[in-house]
Every structure is written in C-alpha cells, then in structure tokens.
Image: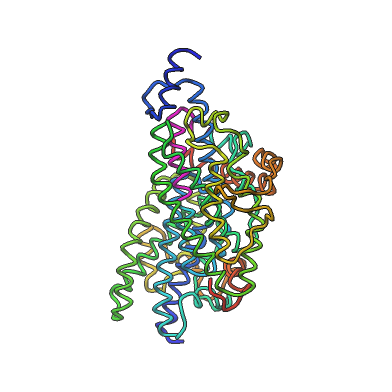
C-alpha cells in the first residue's frame, strides 16, 4: 500500500468522510461501487415480490399504502444508482450486470411470496433487518452515500410501521389470518437470520476496514434480534428456532444459520432468482426502444 | 340503483381499474423515473376511485371497499378501455394519453353539474389530473413519430370514445385531432375477458376470508 493510500485509510478509520471530488484509492472505489451497486440492485429486486401484492391488496387503503411503499423502494434504487454512477459505473451497465447474474442482490429477494402474511412480514421484519444495515451507513466514509441514507432510513422507518400495522390487523383478526402470519414468519426466519451475513470479525471485513460499513455482521444481527424478537413474541407469534434465547449479558443465542443456503441463494440459485431476473430482463429488453427514443430526443 | 349512483360507479370503476393497470408497471417500467411516476399516478387514480366510491356508498348504504372489491365482475361499470391488458409502453402511453384527455372532458362536464357535491369532487380530482395530463402529453409528444405509438393510438381510439357519453365525444375528438364520424365506439356495458382475469387477481386475498378485516 502506498503512503497516500495508507494516509487515506487512516483518515477514514478515524471517522473521516470523503467526497466524490476527492482523490480515492482505486481499491476503495471498486469496493464502494460493488457495495452500492448491490444495495441499489436489492432495492430494485425487492420491488418484484411486493409488486404482485399491490395488485391483490385486500382494501383500497392497503393498496395505496403498499403502492407508496414500493414507490419509495424504486426511488431508493434511483438515488443509490446515482451515487454509483458518480463513482464511474453507468446505470445501463449496472442493470445489464444485474439481469445477466453478474451482480448480486440481497438474499431475501430471491424467495417467493405465498400469502398476504408474507407482505406483512416483508414490510415489517425484512425492512427492519435492512434498516439496521442502512443506519450503519449513515456514518459511511463516502459522504454522498451517507447523505442519501438519511432520506432512505427515514422512509424505511415508515415501511416498518406499515408492515407492523398489516401484521397487527391480521393478528387481531381470525384464526386463519393469524395462521397466515405464523406460516410467513416460519418461511422468512431462516433468510432473516442469514440476512446480515456470516459472523466474520469486523476487522477482517473489507467493507468495515474501509469504513463503508460502520458495524460488523454479528453486531447487526444482534441488534435485529434485540429489537424485534420481543415484539414478535408480544404479538403471540412463535419464532421457529428452539435455541433462540437472550443470554444474561444481553447476547442472543440462536441456531447456526444455514450459510450454504445463503451462498447458494445470493449467487443466483434461490427459489425465485432466475424467474425474477428473467422477468426484469424481459421488460428491460422489450422497452429498450423507449430508452433509445429518449436518448435520441 | 339510481342514475347518480350509476354515474359515480362508472367513473370510480374507470379510475380503479386504470389505476390497477398502471400499477402493473411498478418495478418494470422502462426507466426508474417512470416507475416512480406510474406509482404516483396509480395512487392518485385509486385515491379518486375511493373518493367516488365513498359518495356512491353513501347512496347505497355500504362502504368504498365493498364497492371496489365485493361486486361480481359483471356488476362493474367501467369502460372496456381501462380493462385491456396492455403491458407494452406504446399502448400504455397511448391509453394514458387518451384516458387523460377523455377524463378531462368528463371532469369539465361534471364541474358544471348541478350536483354540488359531485362538482366539488370533480374540481378536486381535476387538480391532480392536470399533472397526469402533463405527463401523458409529454410522452405523447416524445413518441409522436414512433410508428408503434401512432398505431396504438389508432387501435385504442374506439375504446377511448366509448368511455364518454355520446354528447361529449366531439370535444374529445377535437382535443386529440381524431374523428368521431368514421369510428364505431366500443361502448361501456359489455366487458372484455381481461376484466374477469383482473378481478380474480384483485380480489384474491379478500375472497379468501370474506368479512375479515385487513
């Protein structure tokens, strides 16, 4: 590592932030683009499972709320891609890498949704897990990324309220509705526990070393468990992990998440990975003429 | 059902179904900017539908959700125009453009209505529709020279005419520069097979637990 890069690294590790116009080490720029691109991809791919349920929402109010939520997610994708574009990767290239399977997106968006119970669990718990990662980006060493995270976290906190409200309506409804929520929780628990990644020590995580992230994977997972398991229990739901308990020192114990499943899913082998990518690719290709027409104008 | 309730339901159903169709673009629109725009438009249209259903519900003694979701497909009063499944951008923009122009003609007439409640709601709705028209007109201007867009406008024109009462049709034709005389309008009353398909998806969750609160 040359002296300039060492100086840069020491600066960000002391909590310093840099701007798009500052000199950035190439490795830092590459890591930033990869991280930010995956974040943007996740926002965009996360729309597809929820999209189906806008069309099926059981009341006008729920339909409006879910449309607004999903609209926020697309807006986040747009903001996030713009930060990556400024770092040097064009949007068209990011979308092409997404649909070709070269770029990744979060594990939770590779799974199917079966019922309205999934809609509630996604908006409540998947968004809760995501906001924990995103709040840790408020201190990101790359200032433009940290800045957009303020708006994103603010909006995500509304999504969690929306999700909790969907869940609450079902939990105070009929037995059949309560069962839908429990079944959805059973389906999502595994992917939720994998969401923050394997418990690699944070100083060995390059994203932490460069202070792109400001916390380690296990810290994020503990924060999720601490914030949400008590709420899940309070609603009368059962978490499908017999080993889950809060230890005396406040550290949660849990069954080892299936890291092989995580690896397989994020490399495009999840139950809906290929179907969703094909769906996106179909419309990207079908409407290429529109983008061409806009560019020609 | 009286004439006022029938009128309210026809407009509300148009707005609900066109909003539903607009939502089909969520997540897959040609650009992220349009994705966001279509979600906004869909929310507005569905919000208008809700306000209109609320007026109708006061006449009919039920509520907006019951009107939106709990009728059988053949009880809906929407025009075939909004039912069509058109998941390609040329047809979608052609419908948005023709729909907004037709809706403007209809709202103008309603704003002059003796029914103060309806006239007030029409004025309120029109304030949002003004932005939809700007959006649709911008796209229509951009795609004006694209053969597939022009073909889609021609194909949908008989459907668009059918959205309006006959006395309002010449005004729509004047606005979009097309002709009423040579066209056989596809009238409100009969439904396309696409409505039954849409209805089945739209009401799936609600039908799974009749009477439940969501």
Q: Range of the magenta residues?
A: A72-93
Front-lying residue, B177 or A113: A113
Could you tell me residue A274's position as x and y percent? 67, 44
Query: Is residue A74 highlighted in magenta?
Result: yes
Q: Residue at x 59, y 53 (%)?
A: A49
In this view, the residue in front, A187 or A95, is A187
Q: Where does the image place residue B84, in percent across and percent down from the top left?
A: 55, 62
Specify whether residue B158 is in view. no
Residue A44 in picture, x, y percent from top left: 53, 45
Q: Is residue A19 visible?
A: yes
Tell me the colour scheme of the image.
rainbow
Front residue of A243/A134: it is A243
Q: Residue furthest front?
A: A248
* Residue A65 horizontal side relative to residue B111, left or right: right
Provide residue B23's location: percent of width, then percent of height.
Answer: 50, 58
Image quadrant where residue B195 sits: bottom right
Instruction: Residue A296: say if magenta.
Output: no
Which corner quadrant of the image does residue A256 belong to?
A: top right
Magenta-colored segment: predominant secondary structure? helix
């Amino acid at each position: 590592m040359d002296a300039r890069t060492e100086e840069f690294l020491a600066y960000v590790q002391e909590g310093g932030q840099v701007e798009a116009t500052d000199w950035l080490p190439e490795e830092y720029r590459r890591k930033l683009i990869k991280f930010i691109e995956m974040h943007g991809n996740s926002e965009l791919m996360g729309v597809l499972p929820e999209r189906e349920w806008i069309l099926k929402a059981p009341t006008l109010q729920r339909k409006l709320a879910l449309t607004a939520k999903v609209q926020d997610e697309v807006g986040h994708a747009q903001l996030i891609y713009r930060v990556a574009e400024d770092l040097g990767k064009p949007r068209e290239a990011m979308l092409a890498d997404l649909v070709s399977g070269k770029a990744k997106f979060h594990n939770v968006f590779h799974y199917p949704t079966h019922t309205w119970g999934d809609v509630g669990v996604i908006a409540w718990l998947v968004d809760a897990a995501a906001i924990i990662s995103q709040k840790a980006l408020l201190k990101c060493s790359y200032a433009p990324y940290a800045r957009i995270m303020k708006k994103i976290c603010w909006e995500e906190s509304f999504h969690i309220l929306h999700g909790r409200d969907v869940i609450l309506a079902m939990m105070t409804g009929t037995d059949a509705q309560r069962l839908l929520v429990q079944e959805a929780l059973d389906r999502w628990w595994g992917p939720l526990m994998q969401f923050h990644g394997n418990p690699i020590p944070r100083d060995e995580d390059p994203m932490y070393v460069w202070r792109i992230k400001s916390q380690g994977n296990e810290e994020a997972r503990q924060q999720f468990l601490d914030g949400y398991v008590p709420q899940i229990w309070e609603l009368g739901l059962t978490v499908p992990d017999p080993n889950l308990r809060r230890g005396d020192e406040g550290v949660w114990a849990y069954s080892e998440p299936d890291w092989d499943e995580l690896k397989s899913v994020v490399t495009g082998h999840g139950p809906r990975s290929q179907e969703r990518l094909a769906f996106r690719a179909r419309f990207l290709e079908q409407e290429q003429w529109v983008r061409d027409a806009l560019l020609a104008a | 059902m009286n004439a006022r309730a029938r009128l309210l339901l026809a407009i509300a159903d148009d707005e609900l179904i066109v909003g539903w169709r607009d939502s089909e673009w969520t997540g897959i629109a040609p650009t992220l900017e349009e994705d966001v725009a279509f979600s906004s438009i869909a929310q507005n249209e569905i919000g208008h539908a809700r306000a209109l259903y609320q007026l109708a519900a006061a006449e009919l003694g039920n509520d907006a959700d019951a009107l939106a979701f709990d009728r059988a497909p053949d009880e809906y009063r929407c025009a075939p125009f909004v039912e069509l499944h058109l998941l390609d951008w040329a047809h979608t923009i052609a419908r948005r453009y023709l729909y907004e122009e037709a809706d403007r003609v209809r709202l103008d007439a309603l704003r002059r209505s003796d029914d103060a409640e309806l006239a007030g709601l029409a004025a309120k709705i029109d304030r949002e529709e003004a932005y939809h028209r700007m959006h649709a007109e911008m796209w229509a201007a951009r795609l004006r020279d694209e053969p597939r867009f022009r073909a889609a406008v021609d194909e949908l024109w008989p459907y668009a005419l059918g959205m309006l009462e006959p006395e309002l049709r010449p005004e729509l034709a004047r606005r979009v520069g097309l002709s009423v005389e040579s066209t056989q309008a596809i009238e409100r009353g009969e439904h396309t097979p696409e409505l039954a398909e849409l209805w089945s998806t739209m009401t799936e969750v609600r039908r799974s637990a009749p009477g439940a609160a969501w």
